[in-house]
Structure formats: C-alpha cells, structure tokens
Image (tube, coloured by chain):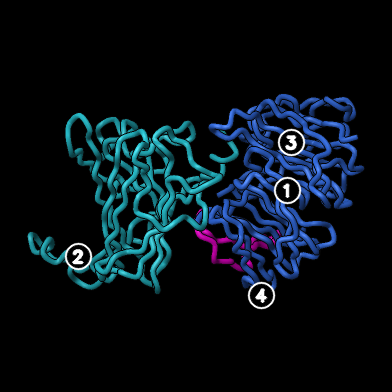
C-alpha cells in the first residue's frame, strides 16, 4: 500500500534544490533526485514529484524545485503524484487485500470501500466526469465501479493477465488497460466490450499516459526477467495502436509518464535513474 | 529485474493479523485429540501476496511436470478444510509457480494448473521445485483457493529446505519479507532413489467461512 499524502507531506525534503534552465529537450528536472512517482498538475505550471523521502513541487517549465511545507501547499494533483487516482474531489487508495478506499481529497475522510478484487490492486482511474472508477487487479479482473453508489457496475472477465495501469480517454467513452499481457487494450466503458488490443510490446507495461486530446498514448515497459529486452517507452496512436516513436529507457522501467501541456514533449522518470527526463515527441 | 513490479509486491503487513480466532481451549494432550475434529477449531490459512504473475484460466491438470523437465521433482499433497473443520470437496485450487530456474510462463500455462478437490477435499500435484529469481528471496508456489460460502484464499507455499532460510526456518523465515507466517513454510521430505530423489510436501489449506 502506498503511504497516504498526509504522512508524506510531513517528511522533510532532502533533495538538492536547484534552478534548472527552461525545459529543453534532453534536460532533466530535479536531476539529482531519485524519482519514485510524479504528476504534472492540470494547471500546467507545476509538477509534483515524490522521491524516496520527499515530496517536491517543481515549476514547469522552469524546473525550480521547492519543498511543500504543509499539506495545504500541495495542489490536488498531488494525490495522483503520490500514487492515487483523483478526480480532484475524491481519490482512490488501493491495498494489497483487494479493497479500494474512496476518500475525500480535502478531508482525507473515507467515503466508501469497494470490495471484490482478490489481492493487490494494480491500477485505478476515475472517469473524466468522476462518476466511474476503473480498477485493474493482479487477479486479472478489470472492474468498473459506480463511485456514488459504491458498487461494482461491471466486471470485465476476459483479461488473463495482471493489470498494472489504466487511463481514460478524455471523452469518458473509452479506457485503456495494460500490464503483464504486454499489450494495451481499449475498452468501451458503457458496454464493457473489448474494442481493440495492441500488438505485444514484448515486455510488461507498467505505465500508461494519454495526451490531453486523446490521440496519443504512451506505454512504459520494463525489462522482464528472461527476455533480455531493455525497458523503453512506446508512443502509440491511440486510435490504431500504431507505433509512432520508441524512447529508450536505459535506467529501468518508467515510474512516471506525463505529456507536457502542449502535448509536444514527454516527461518521464525511470526506476533506477535520476530526475525527470524531457523527450521531444515531434 | 523489474523494480516497478516489486513496488507492487508491497507487504501485506496486516494480512496475517487479526484473523486468527482462538478455538475452544482444551488443556494438555486433549488439545491434540480435539484439534481439527471440533467445529470451529481450525484456523484459516494465512493469506499471502497474489503477485503479478497470476493468469486466469489455467488448465485442469495434476501433472505440472513434463517427463523430461529439469529440476527436482516435487509432489505436493493436502486437503482443503474450512474454519468449521469440515473438508471441502467443492473446493477449487489454482496453483502457479516459476520453473526450476525461476522463470514464470507469462505467455502460456506452463507450471500452472486448476484442480478440483476430491471427495475428501484432497488435492495432489506433481511439479518441480521452483527456482529462485532476483526479485524474490524464497522459493514458492502460489495458491488461489475457492469454495462456496468461503472467503477466497490467496496464499503461497514455501519450503523449509530453502537455502534462503539458512537451515533455520523457525527463526529465519522472514529473510524473505513477504513470508509473514511460519505456517506457510512446510517441511520437505526427500524420497525415492538417492540418485534420483524427489521432494514431498504436505500443505493443508483452511478457508474462512463467510
């Protein structure tokens, strides 16, 4: 289980703080920090970064890092950066016992607990309108939850691999799952129908991110034991899953992926590397 | 090896706590007589992490080991009970494990099986001793066990002979931080021709009644 926000925020930031030059391709944000997770806030001006013992706010695109002093300094997107899925008002906390707890972002009070998965939840994601939560488990199940009712509206039983990541399309009609199958699957959120599946990316997929316009999907793979294939990041056409670009990730699988607000750059951090790398997409 | 994977394999810190219900208290040797025979005397098998390698739909078989498979042959047998001490012939037991080198078959179903318990709740399968792999300390076999009216059990079987336990599983079982219960570490009996030994393990499972 990932540590809750209110615990992490009291930790003292230990990363070296330095002003970086404006985001240029190939530059890194917080270049000395071993990044565990990060998220670009919807305001487009800041990045919340979690390191081993710190949570930092980093200006985008300037790169100046500052440690948040209190919880109130953290923008709502901190919930995502710290491993939760959030629609702004609510966030979902996952566990290793199959339960998902929906909490109020402002008060951290638990609203409801969703039960049904077995074992660790691999990923959760709110629909853009906040009405639905999609979840994927290591039990291979993909579930759609009615957030207000606190009930499971649908279980998609066709997957046969653990799910590690979920993202919704901005229109809320489609969501994407990926994981141990090494493929990305698109689902019709209204019917639960499997719309399409990508070709195998060769390695398990740990992270997905979707551009704001919904046209581009990035999938972060990691080097699986026995495959001798290095980790990389694949940029796919979200509509066809045609591969547009491969970004090598020599320092291990991506622990975070985000499009720049204009959609022309990708921010990513790897499991064994330092900092957040900015890669061009065009 | 995949750090992101291990990140998801976070400890089930509280999994084994708070679920143990004390049975009726019989002093001395009587305790042995009544253990397992009285309603409510069985304690549920501790759960353990599901892990990222589960695949739904494993074939119905008891023979996970092919005739030419390398590795130490392994026979695991046991029975499924519930917390009332009743055998569960309706139980379904899914097992999955790495091969002798520590590799999981992700594309297919090698070393994966779904078994139905027999009329006495029993099960048995042949396999090979699973290998070690970089992300995990101890050799293990994954279990998912279900029966009507019971809480599904996700757990793992470990081996007392595992070098990870340094010959002292009683005190060193937590050398693998995912092993949170000594009860899941089972004795291993080596049998057969000394030139061609096989390992036998008994692992009984107890499901919590809902």
Which quadrant, please, contains the N terminus of chain B? Answer: top right
Q: Which mark is residue A198?
A: 1
| Visible residue check, residue B83 | yes
Which disc, if any, is residue B28? Answer: none
Q: Residue at x 79, y 27 (%)?
A: A28
Element assignment for label 1? loop
Q: Colour of chain A?
A: blue
- Dot 3 falls on a residue whose secondary structure is strand
Q: Nearer the viewer, residue B74 or A26?
A: B74
Quadrant of the rendered image containing residue B4: top right
Q: Mark 4 highlights which residue?
A: A149
Going from N to C along the chain, the mark reached first, 1 or 3, is 1
| Residue at mark 2 to residue at mark 3: CA–CA distance | 54 Å
Q: Residue furthest front?
A: B67
Colour of chain B, in one word, is cyan
* Left or right: A165 as drawn, with respect to B62: right
> How far separated are the C-alphas under marks 2 and 1?
51 Å
Q: Reading the chain from its start, which is encountered first: label 4 or label 1? A: 4
State the image quarter where residue B197 is shown: top left
The residue range painted magenta reads: A96-118
- A45 is within the stretch colored magenta: no
Image coordinates for residue A160, horizontal then vertical, percent: 57, 55
Mark drawn on residue A233: 3
Query: In which image quadrant can residue A272 be found?
Result: top right
Closer mark to the observer between disc 1 and disc 3: 1
- In the rendered image, which quarter contains the C terminus of chain B? bottom left
């Amino acid at each position: 289980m990932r540590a809750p926000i209110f615990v992490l925020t009291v930790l003292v930031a230990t990363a070296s703080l330095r002003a970086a030059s404006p985001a240029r391709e190939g530059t890194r944000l917080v270049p000395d920090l071993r990044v565990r997770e990060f998220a670009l806030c919807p305001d487009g001006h800041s990045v919340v970064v979690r390191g081993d013992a710190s949570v930092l706010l980093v200006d985008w695109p300037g790169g100046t890092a500052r440690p948040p002093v209190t919880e109130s300094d953290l923008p709502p997107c901190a919930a995502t950066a710290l491993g939760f899925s959030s629609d702004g008002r609510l966030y979902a906390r996952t566990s290793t016992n199959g339960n998902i707890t929906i909490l109020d972002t402002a008060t951290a009070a638990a609203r409801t607990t969703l039960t049904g998965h077995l074992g660790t939840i691999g990923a959760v994601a709110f629909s853009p309108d906040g009405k639905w939560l999609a979840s994927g488990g290591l039990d291979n199940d993909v579930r759609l939850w009615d957030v207000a009712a606190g009930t499971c509206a649908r279980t998609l039983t066709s997957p046969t691999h653990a799910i590690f990541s979920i993202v919704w399309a901005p229109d809320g009609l489609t969501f994407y799952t990926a994981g141990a199958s090494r493929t990305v699957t698109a689902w019709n959120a209204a019917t639960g129908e499997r719309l399409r599946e990508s070709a195998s990316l060769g390695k398990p997929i740990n992270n997905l991110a979707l551009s704001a316009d919904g046209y581009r999907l990035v999938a972060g793979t990691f080097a699986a034991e026995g495959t001798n294939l290095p980790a990389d990041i694949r940029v796919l056409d979200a509509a066809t899953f045609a591969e547009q670009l491969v970004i090598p990730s020599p320092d291990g699988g991506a622990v975070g992926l985000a499009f720049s607000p204009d959609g022309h750059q990708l921010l990513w951090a790897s499991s064994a590397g330092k900092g957040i790398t900015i890669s061009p997409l065009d | 090896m995949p750090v992101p994977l291990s990140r998801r394999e976070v400890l089930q810190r509280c999994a084994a706590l708070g679920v143990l219900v004390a049975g009726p208290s019989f002093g001395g040797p009587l305790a042995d007589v009544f253990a397992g025979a009285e309603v409510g005397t069985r304690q549920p098998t501790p759960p353990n992490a599901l892990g990222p390698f589960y695949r739904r739909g494993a074939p119905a078989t008891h023979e996970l080991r092919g005739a030419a498979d390398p590795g130490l042959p392994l026979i695991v047998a046991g029975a499924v009970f519930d917390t009332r001490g009743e055998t569960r012939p309706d139980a379904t037991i899914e097992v999955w494990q790495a091969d002798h080198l520590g590799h999981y078959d992700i594309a297919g179903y090698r070393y994966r099986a779904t078994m139905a318990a027999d009329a006495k709740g029993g099960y048995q399968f042949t396999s090979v001793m699973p290998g070690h792999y970089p992300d995990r300390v101890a050799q293990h076999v994954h279990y998912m066990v279900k029966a009507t009216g019971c809480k599904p059990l996700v757990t793992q079987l470990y081996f007392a002979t595992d070098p990870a336990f340094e010959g002292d599983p009683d005190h060193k079982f937590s050398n693998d931080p995912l092993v949170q219960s000594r009860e899941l570490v089972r004795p291993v009996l080596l049998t057969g021709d000394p030139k061609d030994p096989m390992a036998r393990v008994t692992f009984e499972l107890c499901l919590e009644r809902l």
